[in-house]
Image (cartoon, helix red, strand yellow):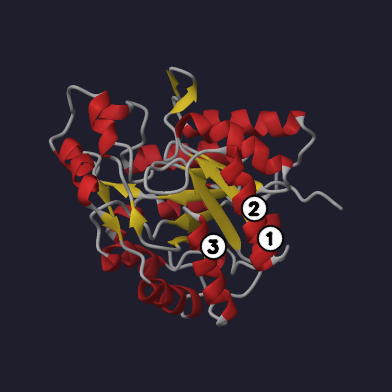
Amino acid sequence: MKIKPVILTCAITGGIHTPTMSPYLPITSEEITKHAIDAVEAGASIIHLHARNEENGKPTSTPDAFLKFLPKIKEKTNAILNLSTGGSPGMTVEERLMVALTVKPEMASLNMGSMNFCLYPLLDKYKKWKFPWEPKFLEMTKDFIFKNTFNDIETSLIKLGKECGTQFEFECYDVSHLYNLAYFVDHGFIKPPFLIQTIFGLLGGIGADMENLFHMRRIAIKLFGEDHEWSVLAAGRHQIPFATTSANMGGNVRVGLEDSLFIEKGKLAKNNAEQVTKIHNILKEMSFVIATPDEVRERLNLKGKNNVGF
């Protein structure tokens, strides 16, 4: 069997980590732009993007915030820009979809099920906070459901997928999410090829256990055969081991400060490009080739960077 080039995604800032946790977390549009461009130069072909309030680093979903960096990254790179529809805890579904429906990207993330999305244990790791919103943001996740009902998913597939031509990174935090995805495939809402992102290590989702990785892969093959692209991300210290294992199993990888703030044990990553370079070098030493953005466009049947709304 011919081994396909590995699709390397970098998630630049996310909506989980807060400014207190790392001075290197990109907050401003200039920082997000630079981190994204540097990550592409280091080897990433897909850039997954969230936006933040430039004054205090709080996640935001306004189109204006995204439009401060999207055109610049598009101009300076050939990367596929993949926008979040997950947003961050506390945002409504309408808020989460607003920017993607406005700018009509090549790709967008889509979470495939409602779940507990628990960040509050991070409160114990920090004594002082840069901004008042941070501890409140983490604490509220103790009594929070990340809402992704079948109606929410169907709405996204129709309004963003069918009507805007956007393809999806289907984010699956547990085995049940793979079965939810299969439901929409079976009912004609989703057609291959598509990208499945299996996610490990978030409290409320499936744990970062290698047995779970193998099981999720087996179920994905059982449900979808080989007519899909499979990728893996894992939170924190599990990031690089899970990415490496995914590539060894014929899959694709995601790294970035959204998923882990560290480059090695006890050492914060100074930028996203450090993590991209690290996994790129590991894969190169293992004789893997990294897919170019245009190769990814062909494999995922994307509409092209010149057919977006920004």
Residue that label 2 marks: 217
Kindly check if marks 3 and 2 are in contact, taking CB atoms under 8 A apart as contact. Answer: no
Which percent across, then down, holds residue 106?
53, 64
User: How far apart are labels 3 and 2 at the CA level?
Assistant: 10 Å
Type of the residue with mark 2: Arg
Placement of 38 over or under 118, stated as above or below: above
Residue that label 3 marks: 178
Residue that label 1 marks: 221
Kindly check if marks 1 and 2 are in contact, taking CB atoms under 8 A apart as contact. Answer: yes
The residue under the point 57% across, 71% down is 182
Q: How many C-alpha atoms fall within 10 Å of the one at disc 1: few (<14), some, or many (≥20)? A: some
Placement of 21 over or under 35, stated as above or below: above
The residue under the point 28% across, 57% down is 145
The residue under the point 23% across, 24% down is 126
In terms of depth relative to the viewer, which is nearer, 308 or 13?
13
Give left or right: position of 202 versus 133.
right
Q: How many C-alpha atoms fall within 10 Å of the one at disc 2: few (<14), some, or many (≥20)? A: many
User: How far apart are labels 3 and 1 at the CA level?
Assistant: 10 Å
Type of the residue with mark 3: Leu
Judged from this view, the residue extending furthest toward the top is: 266
Type of the residue with mark 1: Ile
Q: Secondary structure at mark 2?
A: helix
User: How far apart are labels 1 and 2 at the CA level?
Assistant: 6 Å
Placement of 191 over or under 271, stated as above or below: below
In terms of depth relative to the viewer, which is nearer, 273 or 261?
261
- Sequence-wise, the earlier of marks 3 and 1 is 3
Q: Secondary structure at mark 3?
A: helix
Residue 169 visible within the image: no
